[in-house]
C-alpha cells in the first residue's frame, strides 16, 4: 500500500525506539536496566484515581467541548493564576491529548512554509520534527555544558533572521534538566522586546519538578507584556505521574486558541473525558500530591549524579530540574571495545545496551552529539546497579 512522502519522511522518536528495544530484551528474558523512558515510575496518586472513578460512576464518559470541559478550564485558570500570576479566560485555554499534542497544534496553527523557529539545544527530540512537519524550519541555538546548557543572548541574536517566527523555551529542560533562572529570563524578555515579531512557545511540562528549594519561573510572570505573543504549554504526565492519561493544555491569545480549536476539531476532537475529570483533581491538589514525588526525584538526582561523576571519561553537569541527567562522553569517543570503535554517541548507546545491558538514549537526536541521556525516574536500586554496569563497561574501553 502507498505511503505518502510526507509521512515517510517523518523520523521515529529516538527515545521511544530505545525504550521499545529495551522492553523487547526484557520480554525475551534479558536483564536490562532502562534509563531511556521519560516516564515517572510512580502510580498516579490515589486522590486523582478516585476522582476519575467518581466521574465515571456519574456518567462523565461522553463527548466534551472540543477544547475541554468548563470544569477543566476553570481548574487550569486557578492553577495558572496561582503558579504564574496571570489570569486566563475560557477562550484563552485549550485542552488537548497531551502536551505533545498541544505543541503539534501550536506549530500547525502558527507556522507558514519557511517560517523559522529558534530551538535552544540540547532540545527535546520532537521539537524540530514537529516544526518541519508544519512546514517550518528549525534553527538550533547551542547551549554549552559549561553554561549549564543555557544559550547566551548573543547566540540567540546571531540566529535571528527576517523569517524568525518563534522561540521554544523548555524550563526545566528535557534532556539536560537545565534551569533558566529569573535573571536569565529577564535577559530573554529584554531581547524579545527588540524582536516584537517573535512568538514564545513555553513548554513548562517539568516546571513542578525543580530541586534544592528552587521554583521554576515562567517567563510570562516576569514579562506579562508578552502575553499577546505567548503560548504556555503544560500537562499532567510528568508532575502528576499521568503519562497514560494523555492530557495537556495550552494558554494563549483567544484568536490563536480558537484557531487551534478549529484544527483540533478536525483531528482528535476533545481529549479523553475521564482524564479531564482526573485532571481537575490533579490541578486542585497540586503540591499535596507532587511534593512526595519531587522529593524522591531529588534524592535520585543526587544519587545518580554522584555515581556518574565518579566514572572516568564522563563529564557531568548536575541537573536542577526534570528527571534527566546528560553526561558528556566525548572523551570516550574513538576508543575501542575489542574490534568495535566507539565512533559516536549512537555507537556508545548500542555498546552499553549490548555489553552492560543498560539502555540510555544517545545525545545526537537531542542536538548534542557526544552526550547521552539517562532518566532517573526509576528506583534507587536500579540507579545504583545501572551505573555500576556502565562503569564496568566503560572501563573496558581502550
Image (tube, rainbow, N blue to C red):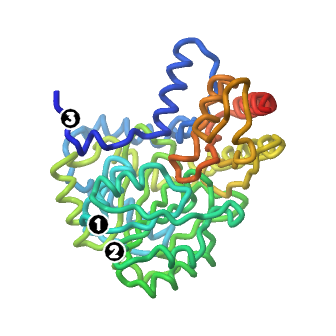
Please identify the quarter of the rendering in which residue 132 is found. Answer: bottom left
Disc 1: which residue: 114
Report which residue position mark 3 lands on. Answer: 3
Q: Residue at x 61, y 44 (%)?
A: 373
Quarter of the N terminus within the rendering: top left
Which residue, as the protein is rendered here, is positioned at the far top?
A: 29
Mark identifier at residue 246: none
Rendered image: mark on residue 163: 2
Viewer-nearest residue: 47 or 201: 201
Within 10 Å of disc 1 (Cα), the crowding (few <14, some 14-19, many 20+) is some
Work out which residue is located at the far bottom of the displayed protein and give it. 194
Quick one: label 1 or label 3, which is nearer the N terminus?
3
Q: Residue at x 69, y 49 (%)?
A: 328
Q: Looking at the image, is 367 positioned above or below residue 391?
A: below
Real-space Cα distance between discs 1 and 3? 24 Å
Callout 1 touching callout 2 (CB < 8 Å):
yes
Amino acid at each position: 500500500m502507498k505511503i505518502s512522502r510526507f509521512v515517510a519522511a517523518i523520523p521515529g522518536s529516538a527515545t521511544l525506539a530505545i525504550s521499545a528495544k529495551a522492553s523487547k530484551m526484557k520480554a525475551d528474558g534479558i536483564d536490562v536496566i532502562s534509563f531511556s523512558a521519560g516516564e515517572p515510575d510512580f502510580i498516579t496518586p490515589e486522590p486523582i484515581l478516585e476522582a476519575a472513578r467518581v466521574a465515571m460512576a456519574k456518567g462523565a464518559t461522553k463527548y466534551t467541548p472540543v477544547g475541554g470541559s468548563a470544569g477543566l478550564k476553570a481548574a487550569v485558570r486557578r492553577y495558572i493564576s496561582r503558579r504564574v500570576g496571570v489570569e486566563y479566560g475560557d477562550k484563552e485555554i485549550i485542552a488537548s491529548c497531551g502536551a505533545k499534542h498541544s505543541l503539534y497544534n501550536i506549530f500547525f496553527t502558527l507556522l507558514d512554509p519557511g517560517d523559522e523557529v529558534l530551538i535552544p539545544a540540547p532540545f527535546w527530540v520532537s521539537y524540530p520534527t514537529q516544526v518541519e512537519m508544519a512546514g517550518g524550519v528549525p534553527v538550533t541555538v547551542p547551549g554549552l555544558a559549561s553554561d549549564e546548557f543555557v544559550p547566551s543572548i548573543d547566540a540567540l541574536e546571531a540566529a535571528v533572521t527576517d523569517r524568525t517566527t518563534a522561540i521554544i523555551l523548555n524550563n526545566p529542560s528535557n534532556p539536560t534538566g537545565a534551569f533558566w533562572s529569573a535573571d536569565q529570563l529577564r535577559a530573554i524578555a529584554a531581547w524579545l522586546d527588540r524582536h516584537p515579531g517573535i512568538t514564545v512557545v513555553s513548554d513548562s511540562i517539568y516546571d513542578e519538578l525543580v530541586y534544592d528549594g528552587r521554583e521554576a519561573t515562567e517567563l510570562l510572570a516576569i514579562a506579562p507584556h508578552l502575553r499577546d505573543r505567548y503560548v504556555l504549554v503544560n500537562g499532567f504526565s510528568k508532575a502528576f505521574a499521568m503519562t497514560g492519561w494523555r492530557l495537556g493544555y495550552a494558554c494563549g491569545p483567544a484568536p490563536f486558541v480558537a484557531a487551534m480549536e478549529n484544527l483540533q476539531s478536525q483531528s482528535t476532537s476533545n481529549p479523553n473525558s475521564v482524564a479531564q475529570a482526573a485532571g481537575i483533581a490533579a490541578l486542585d491538589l497540586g503540591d499535596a500530591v507532587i511534593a512526595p514525588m519531587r522529593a524522591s526525584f531529588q534524592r535520585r538526582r543526587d544519587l545518580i549524579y554522584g555515581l556518574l561523576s565518579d566514572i572516568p571519561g564522563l563529564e557531568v553537569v548536575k541537573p536542577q530540574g526534570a528527571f534527566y541527567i546528560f553526561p558528556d562522553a566525548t572523551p570516550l569517543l574513538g576508543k575501542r571495545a575489542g574490534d568495535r570503535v566507539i565512533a559516536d554517541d549512537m555507537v556508545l548507546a548500542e555498546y552499553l545496551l549490548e555489553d552492560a545491558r543498560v539502555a540510555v538514549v544517545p545525545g545526537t537526536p537531542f542536538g548534542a552529539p557526544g552526550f547521552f541521556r539517562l532518566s532517573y525516574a526509576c528506583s534507587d536500586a536500579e540507579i545504583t546497579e545501572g551505573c555500576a554496569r556502565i562503569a564496568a563497561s566503560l572501563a573496558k574501553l581502550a
